[in-house]
Amino acid sequence: MPITEVTITRRCAHCRYELGELTVKKDNMRLMVTETAWCESCGSDVPELREVAGRVSSVQAEQASYPGNPPVPDVSAAEYRRRRLEGRHL
Ligand SMILES: [Zn+2]
């Protein structure tokens, strides 16, 4: 089941004070907003920055959910042979 919702962190564009979070459907995600928000830290209405929170973890979760993941190749053994061969040339 792919994750279709993302968590957006809203921040003050001036001081990056966290204004809150909201969860939106990926399809409706808007990172560019024109409306302003109240920043307690600045004490004024400020432009709002939006960042995707937890983007990495959602990607990992999607990959982990793929059925029939191919087995991870034994990189360490191949790497060991490669280094041993290189060592003979030195
Ligand atoms: Zn601020």
Image (cartoon, rainbow, N blue to C red):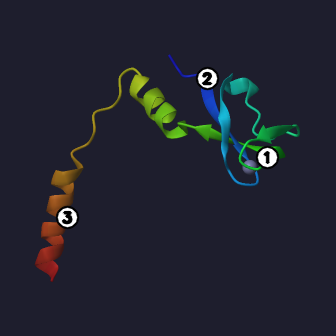
User: Which residue is drawn at the image coordinates 61% and 22% (left, top)?
Assistant: 4
Q: Amino acid at mark 1?
A: Gly
User: According to the image, label 2 marks what residue?
Assistant: 5
Q: Dot 3: within a 10 Å radius of its alpha carbon, few (fewer than 14), some, or many (20 or more) residues? A: few
Position of 68 relative to 57 (above/below): above
Q: CA distance from mark 3 to mark 1?
A: 61 Å
Return the x and y of residue 85 as percentages of the image width and height: 15, 69
Give the mark nearest the N terminus, 3 or 1: 1
Q: CA distance from mark 2 to mark 3?
A: 43 Å
Q: Dot 2: within a 10 Å radius of its alpha carbon, few (fewer than 14), some, or many (20 or more) residues? A: some
User: Which secondary structure lies at badge 1?
Assistant: loop
Which of pointers 2 and 1 indicates the residue nearer the eye? 1
Q: Amino acid at mark 2?
A: Glu
Query: Which mark identifies residue 14?
Result: none
Give the mark nearest the N terminus, 2 or 3: 2
User: Which residue is drawn at the image coordinates 50% and 34% (left, top)?
Assistant: 59
